[in-house]
Image (cartoon, grey):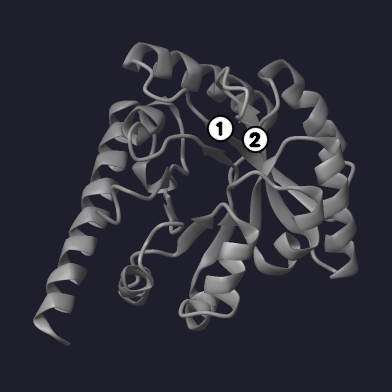
Amino acid sequence: MPTAEITRKGTLLSNFQTISSRIGAARAAAGANPAETSFIAVTKYAADADVIALVEAGAVTIAGENKVQDAKTKWANGALAPLRGKVTLHFIGHLQSNKAKAAVELFDWIDCIDSVKIAAELNRHAAALHRTVPVMIQLKLNDSPTQSGVALPEAGALLAELRGMKNLDARGYMGIAPANAPAEELKSVFADAKKIFDRDFPGPGNYLSLGMSGDYELAAAAGSNLPRIGSSLFA
């Protein structure tokens, strides 16, 4: 392996370890079990070689993409296709109804349910493939008009609808915090999401996916056990 590749792999593994350690420390400081937390490696902008290095090293086992066609190009037909069996692939973007079939065909998890309509489409296509798809409901945690998600007071009703769809397995909540918000606001937003997560998903094996590269430590401290991290990992 050329020296440059060895150096880059070392940097990536160091980034991975730093993120994992910080998440663990935040969880421990909050009185939670660090071992119950993982994170999604957001590979949207990552170089294929970087993703390959981390997956082959056994570091990254969960990846996330937010565009169906881009993910298909990379993970089904491109350089990352040979790794597909080693990675649990999550869809973390806004999903349109006309992409539901392709999403069910490609992704292991779909983390962005925000309406009964999209849930019904996913359930229909999953049934056709004889699959039960683990899903999360996306919470709307900010006031941005372009941000998808369901308002917190409405999340329970949507969850009840999902639990009536036999080919979807509701496993938690996902949310995107307000951009560039101060720490106290983030703590409040994350705490609100954690309350309804605890209410609706009290058992083990469920996920609260809050936090990205800029706020994952605050999210982990608040109870997130599946942050989504891209730029800090692939820096």
Evaluate whether residue 158 shows in this view: yes
Location of mark 1 (residue): 175
The quadrant in which the N terminus is found is: bottom left
In terms of sequence position, does the residue under pointer 1 or pointer 2 come before the other? 2
Question: Three-letter amino acid code at disc 2?
Answer: Gln
Tell whether 70 sits left or right of 25. right
Which residue is located at x 28 percent, y 47 percent?
Answer: 232
* Distance from Cα at disc 1 to Cα at disc 2: 5 Å
Evaluate whether residue 163 shows in this view: no
Tell whether 114 sits left or right of 80. right
Compared with 105, 191 (above or below) is: above
Question: Three-letter amino acid code at disc 1?
Answer: Gly
Q: Nearer the viewer, residue 229 or 71?
A: 71
Location of mark 2 (residue): 138
Disc 2: CA contacts within 10 A as few (<14), some (14-19) or many (>=20): many
Task: Determine whether label 1 and label 2 are within 8 Å by CB.
Answer: yes
Q: Nearer the viewer, residue 29 or 134?
A: 134
Which residue is located at x 78 percent, y 33 percent?
Answer: 159
Which residue is located at x 35 percent, y 42 percent?
Answer: 34
Please tell me in which quadrant of the rendered image residue 223 appears: top left
Residue 72, image x, y percentages? 61, 70
Q: Nearer the viewer, residue 206 or 122?
A: 122
* Element assignment for label 2: strand
Residue 66, image x, y percentages? 57, 52
Residue 23, image x, y percentages? 31, 40
